[in-house]
Amino acid sequence: QVQLVESGGGLVQAGDSLRLSCAASGRTTSRYAMGWFRQAPGKEREFVAAISRSGGNTYYADSVKGRFTISRDNAKNTVNLQMNSLKPEDTAVYYCAARFAGFLVVVTTLSEYDYWGQGTQVTVSS
């Protein structure tokens, strides 16, 4: 089992950047495909970005492609989400998730993830 803790959220203005981090404990993250999801008030949780165990494969939602970058450091058991050119519609609680998967597999479906963090709030003002 793995425990996930997100950090780095906050209140920023449109056009600013934020870097979210997800720290894993319990088992090394190198065993897990990782992803970021977000949930805005009154909306369902949605996929944002995902990365394979190796870090070599990534996938992004169309809404964040070109602005967000997911990365991982297996030596430090962390996964990061660099968010640039933030927009008010990026406002949400952001969740980190993990799933045991093959070395090159990217997991984009919410229901396929086994472990979740508690979330970190990102608020973008216009």
Image: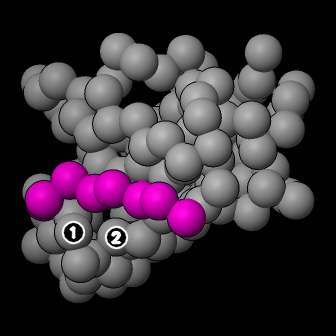
| Dot 1: element | loop
Snapshot colouring: one colour
Residue 107, label in figure: none
Question: Does residue 57 show up magenta in the picture?
Answer: yes
Instruction: Residue type at mark 1: give it.
Output: Lys
Q: Residues within 10 Å of mark 2 (few under 14, many from 20)?
A: many
- For the C terminus, the quadrant is bottom left
Compare residues 15 and 103 and report the one nearer the observer.
103
How far from the left and from the top, in percent, is residue 79? Answer: 63, 55
Q: Is residue 64 above or below residue 112?
A: below
Q: Is residue 84 above or below residue 118?
A: below
How far from the left and from the top, in percent, is residue 106? Answer: 43, 43
How far from the left and from the top, in percent, is residue 54? Answer: 65, 56
Task: Left or right? Give the position of 57 relative to 78.
Answer: left
Residue 125 visible in the shown view: no
**Residue shown at 41%/18% (left/top)?**
112
Compare residues 82 and 125 and report the one nearer the observer.
82
Q: Which residue is mark 2?
A: 68
- Predominant secondary structure, magenta span: loop
How far from the left and from the top, in percent, is residue 107? Answer: 41, 36
Question: Does residue 42 show up magenta in the picture?
Answer: no
Task: Left or right? Give the position of 27 relative to 56.
Answer: right
Q: Which residue is mark 1?
A: 65
Instruction: Residue type at mark 2: give it.
Output: Phe
Residue 86 visible in the shown view: yes
First to last magenta residue range? 56-63
Q: Is residue 10 above or below residue 46?
A: below
Q: Tags 1 and 2 in contact by the CB under 8 Å rule?
A: yes
| Dot 2: element | strand
